[in-house]
Image: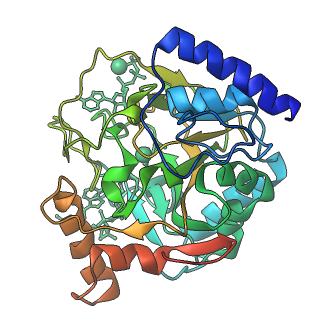
Amino acid sequence: MSRAADRLKVVLNHLDRSHGAVRASFTSAQNVSYHHPHALQYTFDTDVLTPEQRIAYEENGFILIRKLVSDEDIEKFRKEFERISKREVKVPGLLIMKDVSIAKSEFVEGEKAVTKLQDFQEDPELFRYCTLPQILNYVKCFTGPNIMAMHTMLINKPPDTGKKTSRHPMHQDLHYFPFRPADRIVCAWTAMEKVHRGNGCLVVLPGSHHGTLQEHDYPEWEGGVNKMYHGVRNYAPDHPRVHLEMEKGDTVFFHPLLIHGSGMNQTKGFRKAISCHYASSDCYYIDVNGTTQENISNEVKELAAKKYGADTVTFQDTWALRGRLVQGERTSM
Ligand SMILES: CCCCCCCCCC(=O)SCCNC(=O)CCNC(=O)[C@H](O)C(C)(C)COP(=O)(O)OP(=O)(O)OC[C@H]1O[C@@H](n2cnc3c(N)ncnc32)[C@H](O)[C@@H]1OP(=O)(O)O
Ligand SMILES: Nc1ncnc2c1ncn2[C@@H]1O[C@H](COP(=O)(O)OP(=O)(O)OP(=O)(O)O)[C@@H](O)[C@H]1O
Ligand SMILES: O=C(O)CCC(=O)C(=O)O
Ligand SMILES: [Fe+2]
Ligand SMILES: [Mg+2]
Protein backbone atom coordinates (compact mmCIF):
# COMPACT_ATOMS: atom_id res chain seq x y z
CA MET A 1 0.00 0.00 0.00
CA SER A 2 1.34 3.45 -0.92
CA ARG A 3 2.02 6.10 1.68
CA ALA A 4 -0.69 8.32 0.22
CA ALA A 5 -3.23 5.53 0.47
CA ASP A 6 -2.12 4.91 4.01
CA ARG A 7 -2.69 8.51 4.94
CA LEU A 8 -6.02 8.51 3.15
CA LYS A 9 -7.12 5.55 5.18
CA VAL A 10 -6.20 7.29 8.40
CA VAL A 11 -8.19 10.38 7.45
CA LEU A 12 -11.16 8.32 6.32
CA ASN A 13 -11.19 6.33 9.52
CA HIS A 14 -11.22 9.59 11.38
CA LEU A 15 -14.10 10.83 9.22
CA ASP A 16 -16.02 7.61 9.82
CA ARG A 17 -15.76 8.15 13.51
CA SER A 18 -16.56 11.83 13.47
CA HIS A 19 -19.41 11.62 11.00
CA GLY A 20 -20.99 8.39 12.12
CA ALA A 21 -21.87 6.94 8.77
CA VAL A 22 -20.18 7.18 5.42
CA ARG A 23 -22.35 8.35 2.57
CA ALA A 24 -24.41 5.95 0.54
CA SER A 25 -22.96 3.79 -2.15
CA PHE A 26 -21.62 4.87 -5.51
CA THR A 27 -20.24 2.77 -8.27
CA SER A 28 -17.43 4.28 -10.27
CA ALA A 29 -15.13 6.29 -8.05
CA GLN A 30 -13.81 3.49 -5.93
CA ASN A 31 -10.79 2.24 -7.77
CA VAL A 32 -8.55 3.13 -4.86
CA SER A 33 -5.72 0.79 -4.17
CA TYR A 34 -7.18 -0.70 -1.01
CA HIS A 35 -10.64 -1.71 0.05
CA HIS A 36 -12.70 0.84 1.88
CA PRO A 37 -16.40 0.39 1.23
CA HIS A 38 -18.30 3.26 -0.41
CA ALA A 39 -16.04 6.02 0.84
CA LEU A 40 -15.25 8.39 -1.99
CA GLN A 41 -18.08 9.30 -4.29
CA TYR A 42 -16.79 12.38 -6.04
CA THR A 43 -13.14 11.81 -6.93
CA PHE A 44 -10.79 9.27 -8.46
CA ASP A 45 -7.46 8.22 -7.04
CA THR A 46 -4.95 9.67 -9.49
CA ASP A 47 -1.93 10.73 -7.41
CA VAL A 48 -2.85 14.36 -8.16
CA LEU A 49 -5.11 15.28 -5.28
CA THR A 50 -3.77 14.65 -1.81
CA PRO A 51 -6.02 12.60 0.47
CA GLU A 52 -6.86 15.83 2.30
CA GLN A 53 -7.84 17.52 -0.96
CA ARG A 54 -10.03 14.60 -1.96
CA ILE A 55 -11.81 14.69 1.34
CA ALA A 56 -12.22 18.46 1.16
CA TYR A 57 -13.91 18.13 -2.25
CA GLU A 58 -16.14 15.33 -0.99
CA GLU A 59 -17.21 17.50 1.93
CA ASN A 60 -17.35 20.96 0.37
CA GLY A 61 -17.94 20.40 -3.34
CA PHE A 62 -15.08 22.64 -4.44
CA ILE A 63 -11.34 22.91 -4.26
CA LEU A 64 -9.19 25.97 -4.85
CA ILE A 65 -5.76 25.57 -6.45
CA ARG A 66 -3.55 28.61 -6.24
CA LYS A 67 -1.52 29.94 -9.20
CA LEU A 68 -2.51 27.21 -11.63
CA VAL A 69 -2.53 29.34 -14.78
CA SER A 70 0.44 31.55 -15.67
CA ASP A 71 0.29 35.32 -16.04
CA GLU A 72 1.54 34.91 -19.62
CA ASP A 73 -1.39 32.71 -20.57
CA ILE A 74 -3.88 34.99 -18.86
CA GLU A 75 -2.52 38.00 -20.74
CA LYS A 76 -2.98 36.10 -24.01
CA PHE A 77 -6.59 35.28 -23.10
CA ARG A 78 -7.18 38.91 -22.19
CA LYS A 79 -5.82 40.10 -25.54
CA GLU A 80 -8.00 37.63 -27.40
CA PHE A 81 -11.02 38.76 -25.38
CA GLU A 82 -10.31 42.32 -26.53
CA ARG A 83 -9.98 41.31 -30.19
CA ILE A 84 -13.29 39.47 -30.06
CA SER A 85 -15.09 42.22 -28.18
CA LYS A 86 -13.90 44.83 -30.66
CA ARG A 87 -15.20 42.54 -33.40
CA GLU A 88 -11.69 42.24 -34.91
CA VAL A 89 -12.26 38.50 -35.19
CA LYS A 90 -15.47 36.64 -35.69
CA VAL A 91 -15.71 33.26 -33.99
CA PRO A 92 -18.29 30.73 -35.25
CA GLY A 93 -20.85 29.78 -32.62
CA LEU A 94 -19.63 32.36 -30.13
CA LEU A 95 -22.22 34.43 -28.28
CA ILE A 96 -21.46 37.92 -27.03
CA MET A 97 -23.66 38.81 -24.14
CA LYS A 98 -24.23 42.32 -22.78
CA ASP A 99 -25.44 43.24 -19.34
CA VAL A 100 -29.21 43.66 -19.40
CA SER A 101 -28.99 47.18 -17.97
CA ILE A 102 -26.71 48.41 -20.77
CA ALA A 103 -27.92 46.20 -23.63
CA LYS A 104 -30.03 49.01 -25.05
CA SER A 105 -27.55 51.80 -24.46
CA GLU A 106 -26.09 53.27 -27.61
CA PHE A 107 -23.37 54.95 -25.55
CA VAL A 108 -21.57 51.84 -24.41
CA GLU A 109 -19.66 49.95 -27.02
CA GLY A 110 -16.88 47.43 -27.60
CA GLU A 111 -15.51 45.48 -24.68
CA LYS A 112 -17.18 47.73 -22.10
CA ALA A 113 -20.56 46.46 -23.26
CA VAL A 114 -19.58 42.80 -22.98
CA THR A 115 -20.60 40.84 -19.91
CA LYS A 116 -19.80 37.39 -21.14
CA LEU A 117 -18.35 35.53 -24.10
CA GLN A 118 -20.04 32.20 -24.31
CA ASP A 119 -19.08 29.16 -26.41
CA PHE A 120 -15.55 30.05 -27.48
CA GLN A 121 -14.77 26.45 -28.49
CA GLU A 122 -13.95 27.57 -32.06
CA ASP A 123 -11.44 30.20 -30.93
CA PRO A 124 -8.05 28.45 -30.78
CA GLU A 125 -6.47 30.95 -28.38
CA LEU A 126 -9.27 30.98 -25.78
CA PHE A 127 -9.91 27.26 -26.18
CA ARG A 128 -6.28 26.64 -25.26
CA TYR A 129 -7.44 27.35 -21.70
CA CYS A 130 -9.58 24.19 -21.82
CA THR A 131 -6.63 22.07 -22.91
CA LEU A 132 -3.99 23.34 -20.46
CA PRO A 133 -2.29 20.20 -19.12
CA GLN A 134 -2.21 21.45 -15.53
CA ILE A 135 -6.00 22.02 -15.63
CA LEU A 136 -6.76 18.64 -17.22
CA ASN A 137 -4.54 17.00 -14.65
CA TYR A 138 -7.04 18.06 -12.00
CA VAL A 139 -10.11 17.60 -14.17
CA LYS A 140 -9.38 13.91 -14.64
CA CYS A 141 -9.66 13.41 -10.87
CA PHE A 142 -13.36 14.20 -11.23
CA THR A 143 -14.23 13.02 -14.74
CA GLY A 144 -11.86 10.13 -15.31
CA PRO A 145 -9.63 9.85 -18.42
CA ASN A 146 -12.13 10.54 -21.24
CA ILE A 147 -12.76 14.26 -21.08
CA MET A 148 -15.09 16.56 -23.01
CA ALA A 149 -15.06 20.35 -22.74
CA MET A 150 -18.82 20.98 -22.78
CA HIS A 151 -19.23 24.63 -22.03
CA THR A 152 -16.90 27.62 -22.23
CA MET A 153 -17.20 31.16 -20.93
CA LEU A 154 -15.15 34.26 -20.42
CA ILE A 155 -16.97 36.37 -17.87
CA ASN A 156 -16.37 40.12 -17.84
CA LYS A 157 -18.46 41.23 -14.88
CA PRO A 158 -19.08 44.92 -15.47
CA PRO A 159 -19.14 47.71 -12.90
CA ASP A 160 -22.68 47.71 -11.60
CA THR A 161 -24.84 50.43 -13.12
CA GLY A 162 -26.77 50.81 -9.87
CA LYS A 163 -29.45 48.29 -10.74
CA LYS A 164 -27.56 45.32 -9.25
CA THR A 165 -27.78 43.49 -12.57
CA SER A 166 -24.10 42.56 -12.32
CA ARG A 167 -25.04 39.98 -9.71
CA HIS A 168 -25.33 36.35 -10.66
CA PRO A 169 -28.08 34.70 -8.60
CA MET A 170 -27.35 31.59 -6.59
CA HIS A 171 -27.66 28.56 -8.84
CA GLN A 172 -26.53 25.03 -9.62
CA ASP A 173 -24.89 24.65 -13.02
CA LEU A 174 -26.48 21.21 -13.46
CA HIS A 175 -29.76 23.05 -14.09
CA TYR A 176 -28.35 23.81 -17.58
CA PHE A 177 -27.02 20.34 -18.35
CA PRO A 178 -29.08 17.48 -19.83
CA PHE A 179 -26.37 14.94 -19.07
CA ARG A 180 -25.37 12.76 -16.16
CA PRO A 181 -24.02 11.53 -13.86
CA ALA A 182 -23.49 14.82 -12.06
CA ASP A 183 -20.43 13.54 -10.21
CA ARG A 184 -18.56 13.14 -13.52
CA ILE A 185 -19.00 16.84 -14.36
CA VAL A 186 -16.77 19.61 -13.04
CA CYS A 187 -16.29 23.32 -13.62
CA ALA A 188 -12.85 24.93 -13.76
CA TRP A 189 -13.03 28.68 -13.08
CA THR A 190 -9.85 30.76 -13.21
CA ALA A 191 -9.53 34.32 -11.94
CA MET A 192 -7.95 36.55 -14.60
CA GLU A 193 -7.12 39.18 -11.98
CA LYS A 194 -7.61 39.55 -8.25
CA VAL A 195 -11.24 38.81 -7.42
CA HIS A 196 -12.64 39.84 -4.07
CA ARG A 197 -15.89 40.75 -2.42
CA GLY A 198 -15.79 44.26 -3.84
CA ASN A 199 -15.71 43.20 -7.49
CA GLY A 200 -18.07 40.27 -7.10
CA CYS A 201 -16.11 37.12 -6.38
CA LEU A 202 -17.75 33.71 -6.41
CA VAL A 203 -19.92 32.96 -3.40
CA VAL A 204 -20.48 29.30 -2.59
CA LEU A 205 -22.59 27.27 -0.17
CA PRO A 206 -20.15 24.56 0.96
CA GLY A 207 -21.59 21.05 0.99
CA SER A 208 -24.66 22.00 -1.04
CA HIS A 209 -23.52 19.50 -3.72
CA HIS A 210 -24.76 16.75 -1.37
CA GLY A 211 -28.31 17.85 -2.14
CA THR A 212 -30.39 17.34 -5.25
CA LEU A 213 -31.04 19.60 -8.21
CA GLN A 214 -33.36 22.42 -7.10
CA GLU A 215 -36.05 24.28 -8.97
CA HIS A 216 -34.65 27.36 -10.73
CA ASP A 217 -36.36 30.49 -12.00
CA TYR A 218 -35.68 34.16 -12.61
CA PRO A 219 -35.29 35.86 -9.22
CA GLU A 220 -37.69 38.73 -8.64
CA TRP A 221 -35.13 41.51 -8.68
CA GLU A 222 -36.26 45.10 -9.06
CA GLY A 223 -33.49 46.21 -11.39
CA GLY A 224 -33.87 43.25 -13.75
CA VAL A 225 -32.03 39.98 -14.34
CA ASN A 226 -29.85 38.89 -17.23
CA LYS A 227 -31.19 36.41 -19.77
CA MET A 228 -30.96 32.83 -18.52
CA TYR A 229 -29.61 33.86 -15.12
CA HIS A 230 -31.93 31.58 -13.23
CA GLY A 231 -31.55 31.26 -9.48
CA VAL A 232 -32.57 28.56 -7.02
CA ARG A 233 -36.17 29.26 -6.24
CA ASN A 234 -36.10 28.88 -2.48
CA TYR A 235 -32.83 30.64 -1.86
CA ALA A 236 -32.25 31.02 1.88
CA PRO A 237 -30.11 34.15 2.29
CA ASP A 238 -28.98 33.09 5.78
CA HIS A 239 -27.34 29.80 4.72
CA PRO A 240 -23.60 29.90 5.59
CA ARG A 241 -21.66 31.22 2.61
CA VAL A 242 -18.02 31.34 1.64
CA HIS A 243 -16.63 34.16 -0.49
CA LEU A 244 -13.87 32.80 -2.71
CA GLU A 245 -11.29 35.54 -2.89
CA MET A 246 -8.73 34.63 -5.53
CA GLU A 247 -5.55 35.96 -7.09
CA LYS A 248 -4.85 36.04 -10.81
CA GLY A 249 -4.34 32.48 -12.04
CA ASP A 250 -5.97 30.81 -9.05
CA THR A 251 -8.44 28.15 -10.16
CA VAL A 252 -11.43 26.66 -8.43
CA PHE A 253 -12.85 23.28 -9.43
CA PHE A 254 -16.44 22.77 -8.37
CA HIS A 255 -19.26 20.25 -8.56
CA PRO A 256 -22.30 21.06 -10.77
CA LEU A 257 -24.70 20.73 -7.83
CA LEU A 258 -22.76 23.22 -5.70
CA ILE A 259 -24.94 26.27 -5.10
CA HIS A 260 -22.98 29.36 -6.07
CA GLY A 261 -23.35 32.85 -7.48
CA SER A 262 -21.52 36.14 -7.45
CA GLY A 263 -22.18 39.49 -5.87
CA MET A 264 -22.32 42.81 -7.63
CA ASN A 265 -19.23 44.54 -8.92
CA GLN A 266 -18.85 47.69 -6.87
CA THR A 267 -15.56 48.72 -8.48
CA LYS A 268 -14.92 50.65 -11.67
CA GLY A 269 -13.06 47.75 -13.29
CA PHE A 270 -14.38 44.77 -15.22
CA ARG A 271 -13.86 41.58 -13.22
CA LYS A 272 -12.63 38.85 -15.56
CA ALA A 273 -12.67 35.08 -15.22
CA ILE A 274 -12.38 32.26 -17.71
CA SER A 275 -14.09 28.93 -17.24
CA CYS A 276 -14.87 25.57 -18.74
CA HIS A 277 -17.32 22.87 -17.73
CA TYR A 278 -15.96 19.41 -18.35
CA ALA A 279 -17.76 16.09 -18.40
CA SER A 280 -16.64 12.53 -18.81
CA SER A 281 -17.31 11.52 -22.40
CA ASP A 282 -18.88 8.40 -20.86
CA CYS A 283 -21.74 10.55 -19.57
CA TYR A 284 -25.14 10.14 -21.22
CA TYR A 285 -27.88 12.55 -22.21
CA ILE A 286 -31.17 12.57 -20.33
CA ASP A 287 -34.64 13.72 -21.29
CA VAL A 288 -35.53 16.76 -19.19
CA ASN A 289 -39.19 16.93 -20.19
CA GLY A 290 -41.33 16.93 -17.08
CA THR A 291 -38.39 17.86 -14.84
CA THR A 292 -37.35 21.15 -13.23
CA GLN A 293 -35.01 21.69 -16.20
CA GLU A 294 -37.84 22.09 -18.68
CA ASN A 295 -37.89 25.89 -18.34
CA ILE A 296 -34.23 26.39 -19.23
CA SER A 297 -34.44 23.74 -21.93
CA ASN A 298 -37.19 25.73 -23.65
CA GLU A 299 -35.18 28.95 -23.43
CA VAL A 300 -32.07 27.32 -24.86
CA LYS A 301 -34.00 25.70 -27.71
CA GLU A 302 -35.53 29.05 -28.56
CA LEU A 303 -32.10 30.65 -28.65
CA ALA A 304 -30.65 27.77 -30.71
CA ALA A 305 -33.47 28.06 -33.21
CA LYS A 306 -32.49 31.70 -33.71
CA LYS A 307 -28.75 31.07 -33.68
CA TYR A 308 -28.56 27.98 -35.88
CA GLY A 309 -31.73 28.76 -37.81
CA ALA A 310 -33.11 25.30 -37.16
CA ASP A 311 -36.10 24.61 -34.95
CA THR A 312 -35.45 20.89 -34.86
CA VAL A 313 -32.45 21.27 -32.55
CA THR A 314 -33.03 19.52 -29.24
CA PHE A 315 -31.61 20.69 -25.91
CA GLN A 316 -29.28 17.69 -26.04
CA ASP A 317 -28.17 18.57 -29.60
CA THR A 318 -27.11 22.05 -28.50
CA TRP A 319 -24.68 20.40 -26.09
CA ALA A 320 -23.45 17.66 -28.45
CA LEU A 321 -22.69 20.41 -31.00
CA ARG A 322 -20.67 22.50 -28.58
CA GLY A 323 -18.82 19.71 -26.81
CA ARG A 324 -15.18 19.07 -27.75
CA LEU A 325 -13.01 16.12 -26.81
CA VAL A 326 -9.89 17.27 -24.95
CA GLN A 327 -8.50 13.97 -23.69
CA GLY A 328 -9.04 10.24 -24.28
CA GLU A 329 -11.89 8.99 -26.45
CA ARG A 330 -15.30 10.39 -27.34
CA THR A 331 -17.30 7.40 -26.23
CA SER A 332 -20.88 8.51 -25.63
CA MET A 333 -21.30 12.28 -25.52
C1 LIG B 1 -26.79 28.17 -23.14
C2 LIG B 1 -26.77 27.43 -21.83
C3 LIG B 1 -25.81 28.02 -20.86
C4 LIG B 1 -25.32 26.96 -19.90
C5 LIG B 1 -24.56 27.59 -18.80
C6 LIG B 1 -24.10 26.61 -17.81
C7 LIG B 1 -23.91 27.24 -16.50
C8 LIG B 1 -23.73 28.67 -16.64
C9 LIG B 1 -24.77 29.46 -15.95
C10 LIG B 1 -24.97 30.69 -16.75
O1 LIG B 1 -24.09 31.37 -17.12
S1 LIG B 1 -26.51 31.06 -17.10
C11 LIG B 1 -26.41 32.40 -18.17
C12 LIG B 1 -26.09 32.01 -19.47
N1 LIG B 1 -26.51 33.06 -20.24
C13 LIG B 1 -26.68 32.90 -21.49
O2 LIG B 1 -26.44 31.87 -22.02
C14 LIG B 1 -27.19 34.06 -22.18
C15 LIG B 1 -26.73 33.99 -23.53
N2 LIG B 1 -26.86 35.25 -24.18
C16 LIG B 1 -27.87 35.53 -24.96
O3 LIG B 1 -28.77 34.74 -25.05
C17 LIG B 1 -27.81 36.78 -25.73
O4 LIG B 1 -26.73 37.55 -25.30
C18 LIG B 1 -29.12 37.56 -25.72
C19 LIG B 1 -30.18 36.76 -26.44
C20 LIG B 1 -29.58 37.83 -24.29
C21 LIG B 1 -28.97 38.89 -26.41
O5 LIG B 1 -28.22 38.74 -27.59
P1 LIG B 1 -28.43 39.66 -28.87
O6 LIG B 1 -27.18 39.63 -29.68
O7 LIG B 1 -29.72 39.26 -29.52
O8 LIG B 1 -28.54 41.10 -28.21
P2 LIG B 1 -29.15 42.42 -28.76
O9 LIG B 1 -28.28 43.51 -28.28
O10 LIG B 1 -29.41 42.32 -30.24
O11 LIG B 1 -30.53 42.53 -28.02
C22 LIG B 1 -31.68 41.81 -28.38
C23 LIG B 1 -32.68 41.87 -27.25
O12 LIG B 1 -32.17 41.15 -26.10
C24 LIG B 1 -32.14 41.99 -24.98
N3 LIG B 1 -30.97 41.64 -24.18
C25 LIG B 1 -29.69 41.82 -24.50
N4 LIG B 1 -28.89 41.38 -23.53
C26 LIG B 1 -29.70 40.91 -22.58
C27 LIG B 1 -29.47 40.33 -21.31
N5 LIG B 1 -28.25 40.15 -20.85
N6 LIG B 1 -30.52 39.96 -20.59
C28 LIG B 1 -31.77 40.13 -21.05
N7 LIG B 1 -32.06 40.65 -22.23
C29 LIG B 1 -31.03 41.06 -22.99
C30 LIG B 1 -32.04 43.38 -25.56
O13 LIG B 1 -32.45 44.31 -24.60
C31 LIG B 1 -32.95 43.26 -26.75
O14 LIG B 1 -34.28 43.29 -26.30
P3 LIG B 1 -35.49 43.79 -27.20
O15 LIG B 1 -35.69 42.75 -28.25
O16 LIG B 1 -36.65 43.88 -26.24
O17 LIG B 1 -35.07 45.11 -27.74
N1 LIG C 1 -32.72 36.79 -3.56
C1 LIG C 1 -31.65 36.18 -4.05
N2 LIG C 1 -31.80 35.08 -4.84
C2 LIG C 1 -30.74 34.45 -5.33
N3 LIG C 1 -29.48 34.85 -5.12
C3 LIG C 1 -29.27 35.94 -4.38
C4 LIG C 1 -30.33 36.68 -3.81
N4 LIG C 1 -29.82 37.71 -3.13
C5 LIG C 1 -28.49 37.66 -3.27
N5 LIG C 1 -28.16 36.59 -4.00
C6 LIG C 1 -26.82 36.17 -4.40
O1 LIG C 1 -26.00 36.10 -3.25
C7 LIG C 1 -24.67 36.34 -3.64
C8 LIG C 1 -24.09 37.49 -2.84
O2 LIG C 1 -24.63 38.68 -3.33
P1 LIG C 1 -24.37 40.15 -2.81
O3 LIG C 1 -24.51 41.06 -3.95
O4 LIG C 1 -25.22 40.41 -1.63
O5 LIG C 1 -22.87 40.16 -2.46
P2 LIG C 1 -22.13 39.92 -1.12
O6 LIG C 1 -20.89 39.25 -1.51
O7 LIG C 1 -23.05 39.25 -0.17
O8 LIG C 1 -21.78 41.34 -0.64
P3 LIG C 1 -22.43 42.18 0.55
O9 LIG C 1 -22.75 41.24 1.67
O10 LIG C 1 -21.39 43.17 0.83
O11 LIG C 1 -23.70 42.73 -0.04
C9 LIG C 1 -24.72 36.61 -5.13
O12 LIG C 1 -24.51 35.42 -5.81
C10 LIG C 1 -26.10 37.13 -5.31
O13 LIG C 1 -26.47 37.04 -6.65
O1 LIG D 1 -18.26 34.44 -12.79
C1 LIG D 1 -19.31 34.48 -12.18
O2 LIG D 1 -19.75 35.52 -11.73
C2 LIG D 1 -20.09 33.23 -11.95
C3 LIG D 1 -20.58 32.67 -13.21
C4 LIG D 1 -21.31 31.40 -13.07
O3 LIG D 1 -21.48 30.87 -12.01
C5 LIG D 1 -21.85 30.79 -14.25
O4 LIG D 1 -21.81 31.42 -15.31
O5 LIG D 1 -22.31 29.67 -14.16
FE1 LIG E 1 -22.47 28.87 -12.37
MG1 LIG F 1 -25.01 40.62 0.40
Left/right of residue 60 with respect to residue 30 in the rendered view: left
Which image quarter has ligand 1?
Answer: bottom left
Q: In the image shown, does 157 or 129 lie closer to the viewer?
A: 129
When the figure is inspected, residue 196 is found, relative to residue 321, above or below; the finding is above
Q: Residue at x 45, y 30 (%)?
A: 23
Q: In the picture, residue 331 is in which quadrant?
A: bottom right
Q: Is residue 78 above or below residue 326?
A: above
Question: Residue 299's spot in the image, x, y percent?
Answer: 21, 66
Query: Is 94 in front, or is 175?
Result: 175
- Nearest the eye: 107 or 212: 212
Q: Is residue 22 left or right of residue 316?
A: right
Q: Looking at the image, can residue 99 be seen? A: no
x, y percent for residue 25: 45, 40
Write the residue at 31% across / 34% down: 164
Q: Is residue 141 above or below residue 2?
A: below
- Is residue 210 visible in the rendered image? The answer is yes
Foreground of the two, 306 or 138: 138
Q: Position of residue 308 (x, y in %)?
A: 34, 86
Number of marks in the rendered image: 0
x 71%, y 48%: residue: 138
Q: Is residue 329 above or below residue 97?
A: below
Q: Is residue 139 left or right of residue 107?
A: right
What is the image's colouring?
rainbow
> Which quarter of the figure is the N terminus placed in?
top right
Q: Quadrant of residue 225?
A: top left
Residue 217 picture location, percent across and down = 18, 46
Question: Please, which residue is most extreme toward the top here?
Answer: 18
